Image (cartoon, grey):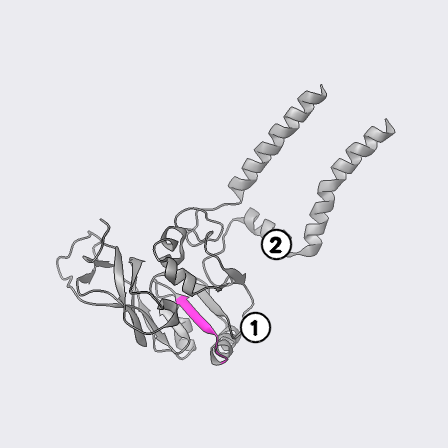
Amino acid sequence: MQREAWAVLLILLLAGGAAYAHATTTTEEFSRYNVGWNGTSNLAAEEVRDLRGLDPGATLLILAPDRPFTAEEVGYLRTFLDAGGHLIVADEEGAANGLLADLGSTIRVRPGNLASLKRDHTDPGLFTVQVVGNSTLFAGIETVRVNRPAAVEGGEPLLETSILTWDDADGDGRIGGKETFGTAVVCAREGNLTVLGDASLFVNAMLAENPKFIENIQPVLVDGAHSRTGTENLLINAVAWVRETPAAAAAFAALAVLPVAWHFGRKRDD
């Protein structure tokens, strides 16, 4: 009878573990809780949510931002840049243009669907671009593989496509109609501010494509308050809150110990 009880307990624990693992993962693009190809679970980065007092020796990544920045937060970023901090804004949808304007930058992201004949994949949206500027981010690198990047205007160009590139407006993977070949800048900088028109460089599937670039940016902080690295999954957020709140973590640990203590206390009384 006791052996059967332990077997049932083991099955319940395994089932609970599987259910927990399933409930605490997501398929949301760029989410650090997404272990799939388009998540950022494998990106080595420390998440920060408060932009005050950032270490001026750090590199901060704002990845695919989808929330507005307050005037105070813009001020914190200005202070960070002025003190020598490095800021990377990775955006392909133009959502970061408001922040760039507030920071006084002339760089803008121009959303599109760049494709190129200079590729070694069947997908014309996955192609290589040339390093054309001097930056520690691309030290020791000649080319970078990008995934349907957006064009970047203004600033000092750092990454540029070949002339065999076009904006594939109709998405058919072929140049035609009013589409024309031409070069495009997909990364530029102004001082310590770098704008990259391809947020997908940081997803799990692309990390192995540009290992030297990922190595160059380490160690890196990720702005978790505005980047799409979070999740809308309520259970995941609740678990994260418990982990980040010592009092809550202690309370849940106590609740977990109580049944065990009660069980062994009962056996001693018997």
Q: Number of numbered discs present? A: 2
> What secondary structure is marked by label 1?
loop
Quadrant of the rendering where the N terminus is positioned: top right
Q: Quick one: label 2, few (<14), some, or many (20+) residues within 10 Å?
A: few
Residue 126, given in percent of the width and then of the height, sits at: 27, 54
Quadrant of the rendering where the C terminus is positioned: top right
- Most extreme residue toward the top is 1
Q: Earlier in the sequence, mark 1 or mark 2?
A: 1
Closest to the observer, 222 or 108: 222
Answer whether residue 87 is magenta in the image: yes
- Most extreme residue toward the right is 269
In the image, residue 102 sits, relative to residue 218, either above or below, namely below
Residue 174, given in percent of the width and then of the height, sits at: 16, 54
Q: Quick one: label 1, few (<14), some, or many (20+) residues within 10 Å?
A: some
Residue 158, given in percent of the width and then of the height, sits at: 31, 71
Closest to the observer, 162 or 140: 140
Task: Work out how far the residue at label 1 is from the one at label 2, CA to CA, in angstroms.
Answer: 21 Å
Which residue is painted at 38% across and 62% down in the image?
213
Which residue is painted at 49% across and 50% down in the image?
33
Closest to the observer, 218 or 146: 218
Residue 164 visible somewhere in the drawing: yes
In the image, residue 165 sits, relative to residue 265, either above or below, namely below
In the image, residue 250 sits, relative to residue 60, either above or below, namely above
Q: Amino acid at mark 1?
A: Arg
Which residue is painted at 82% across and 31% down in the image?
266
Residue 59, given in percent of the width and then of the height, sits at: 47, 69
Residue 68 visible somewhere in the drawing: no
The numbered mark at residue 232 is none
Q: Which residue is mark 2?
A: 241
Answer whether residue 98 is magenta in the image: no
Q: Which residues are magenta?
A: 83-89
Q: Which residue is mark 1?
A: 52
